[in-house]
Image (cartoon, rainbow, N blue to C red):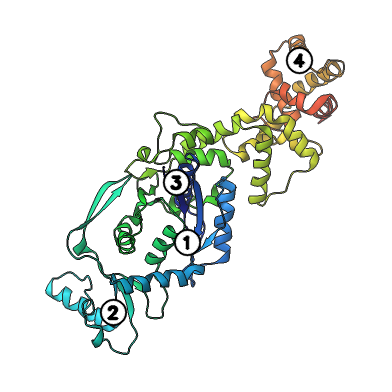
Amino acid sequence: MTQDVVTRFAPSPTGFLHIGGARTALFNWLYARGRGGRFLLRIEDTDRARSTTAATDAILKGLAWLGLDHDGEVVSQAARAERHAEVAREMLARGHAYKCFSTQEEIEAFRENARAEGRSTLFRSPWRDADPATHPDAPYVIRLRAPQDGETVIADAVQGDVRIGNDQLDDMVLLRSDGTPVYMLAVVVDDHDMGVTHVIRGDDHLNNAARQMQIYRAMDWPVPVYAHIPLIHGPDGKKLSKRHGAVGLEEYQVMGYPAAGMRNYLARLGWSHGDDEVFSDEQAQDWFDLDGIGRSPARLDFKKLDNISGQHIAIMPDAALLHEIEAFLDAAGRAPLSDAQRDALARALFCLKDRAKTIPELLEKAHFALATGPVEPDEKAAKALDPVSRRILSELTPQLQNASWSRNDLEAVANAVAEANGVKFGKLAGPMRAALAGRTVTPSVFDMMLVLGRDESVARLDRAARAGT
């Protein structure tokens, strides 16, 4: 019987959800969902001084926007402190840990002497093999009794076998002198108790894995499959930071990238499936595997993100896209759509979806449908409404009053009016755009007229024709 796959995402609530963290969450979600497994969420809030409720809320909101649903309740690591301490005491009872009474001053003196003598500054506690009868009545920490020879081999699903000499690993503290557990212990206990089978995380945790494996072995617990993924770098190849632009996930929603496009782009950021660039969630879940993750850092590429985003907007069902647009307006602090605007936008999506890479671009092209009150042409569009153009528009409007409101008839009427005035339709299209949308870059004038309907289209064209008279 095969073991059910269980993955987890375990962010620290000390700030926004970094795009690298969002990708880690996505990889865990894809791996679990593609195998009928479970994807769990744990908030690693043991750093009480820096952990905030606002940061936790931002993480949950970001994951919800990205569409990464988790199984079961959100686990608080801090709430499990007593369980972590219990494991440390059990390791002590088994002889896999020991009480260390060394003070901070003694540890620092050890390191200073080691530096002066050119030795390793890795602390070696004099209490490791001390007779318990010699233990003083003083505060102590509980340290792991780590092996000091041989090596620890991390069989990493991305990095391959990573070998670390045990002489490079210290007897790490498990329980502080005030009885509180350290993060390194808490992670292992939580992963074991939550049944996590695959630990997929950033490769900045790779060295931690060797130390954490010692705890698994001391407790006779199965070691999970490790997969340490390279970090995300900026376009210049340097570690991603604010100088490269957006690093928080919520910034990408405010920039107007749809969640489906963001999922697709993040999946391709360090993972590949042949030459496939644009794919659905179902395909990503079917295809995603750890052997498709590269060992080199991925580079953020906004041009590729724009391209993938635009393709997802183009293929997204209208109802889903409208929901995404309304979520964007809320996240960006912009005014919500009125019922009339929502209806008009729904009618217009057919001529907008394949023309925008982001939601703000789509909304700009939707200006003709969203405008309330008379449309005022911008500076560029106003130049198209010269006296000759306005005269031709004045001839066009009565013809449109009697046309059947179909694309073929609208094209026929417009072409006939242009021909009667000795110009090609291209010369008439600019003034029509200015009249209907107040812009020079718009969907087809006929698409706009179909969306607006006869009365509104004729009213806008007539208003532009009369302007300046």
The mark that comes first in sequence, 3 or 4, is 3
Quadrant of the image occupied by residue 413: top right
Q: Nearer the viewer, residue 91 or 352?
A: 91
The mark that comes first in sequence, 1 or 3, is 3
Q: Residues within 10 Å of mark 1 (few under 14, many from 20)?
A: many
Helix, strand or loop under label 1: loop
- Which callout, 4 or 2, points to the residue nearer the camera? 2
Q: Is residue 30 left or right of residue 60?
A: left
Q: Real-space Cα distance between discs 1 and 3?
A: 23 Å
Q: Nearer the viewer, residue 308 or 432?
A: 308
Helix, strand or loop under label 4: helix
Residue to which mark 2 is pinned: 100
Q: Real-space Cα distance between discs 1 and 2?
A: 29 Å
Residue to which mark 1 is pinned: 12
The mark that comes first in sequence, 4 or 2, is 2
- Which callout, 3 or 4, points to the residue nearer the camera? 3
Residue to which mark 3 is pinned: 5
